[in-house]
Amino acid sequence: MTTVVRIRVLSVLAVALLWELLALSGAGADDFFPHLWTLAAAFGDVLTSDFAGDVGVTLFQLFWGASIGIVVGLVLGLLLATRPLVREIVEPLLVYLSTVPKIVLYPVFLLFLSVGTESKIAMAAFGAFFPVVLHTLGAVSDVRPVWLNAARLLHTSGGQRMRHVYIPAMAPTMFAGVRLGIATSIIGTVMAESKAADEGVGYRVIFYYSQYQIPQMYVVLLLVFVFSVLVAVGLDRLGRVLRLGGGHRTDREISL
């Protein structure tokens, strides 16, 4: 077991110990911090409910929303990256729009897309879009002028420069945007489900809260956290396999 793993395990144990101490402290704290054995029992209650169906709904909405947001963000980012004048006009607008809390725009999605699956997918897509497109635009600085000059001397087409120069050089930063986009997409999906829905993980959290089933609510939140961690770890390992963990590509890796 490596030092990093030990630290992570000890951190989890420390949090669990602190939680149990708060539960044992009395003075009504157990209403907000249920005992660990109470949470364990609630875990079984959650699994025997309709939670599996809620998970399926959330994953469906998350998959399509994140996919749409990532694809649109990458395509628009790459197009703007190769058009400096248009980029100078559009990029500030994208930065300003990205600062708007996504949940504020959810009523607009409800107005045009109703309370069904479409509005949740739109929220997920909206959450994924901005990190991806902004990271893609920021990745332009990873493209060295010498590579572009070499490509022009070889009389390459715009498509060839995009495929052999821009994308390889920008890939690490773009992948970082995809990772962040998926994370914000998860948040957007769950938040949308908690506002106007009758199914999904976000709905299940609010349902348990409204019924004052606090242990069950915490269990669902914990499962969302675990899922998010697993996704982050999976993307991190994928980035390492694809050599997209960060940093600039070398001249050898940019081949024409």
Image (spheres, rainbow, N blue to C red):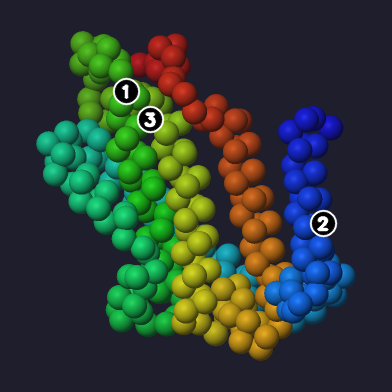
Residue pictured at 80% horizontal, 44% vertical: 10
Viewport quadrant of the N terminus: top right
Viewport quadrant of the C terminus: top left
- Crowding at dot 3, Cα within 10 Å, few <14 / some 14-19 / many 20+, comes out as many
Which quarter of the figure has residue 169? top left
Residue 174 lies, in percent from the top left, at: 41, 37
Mark earlier in primary sequence (1, 3): 1
Residue 13 lies, in percent from the top left, at: 81, 51
Mark earlier in primary sequence (1, 2): 2
CB of mark 1 within 8 Å of CB of mark 3? yes
Q: Nearer the viewer, mark 3 or mark 2?
A: 2
Alpha carbons under labels 3 and 2: distance apart: 44 Å
Q: Amino acid at mark 3?
A: Met
Give left or right: position of 112 versus 125.
left
Kind of element beneath mark 1: loop
| Label drawn at residue 143 | 1
**Vertical comparison of 58 with 225: above or below:** below
Alpha carbons under labels 1 and 3: distance apart: 7 Å
Give left or right: position of 69 versus 78.
right
Kind of element beneath mark 3: helix
Residue 7 lies, in percent from the top left, at: 76, 38
Q: Nearer the viewer, mark 1 or mark 2?
A: 2
Mark earlier in primary sequence (3, 2): 2
Kind of element beneath mark 2: helix
Q: Residue beneath label 3, please? A: 170
Residue pictured at 39% horizontal, 69% vertical: 103
Q: Amino acid at mark 1?
A: Val
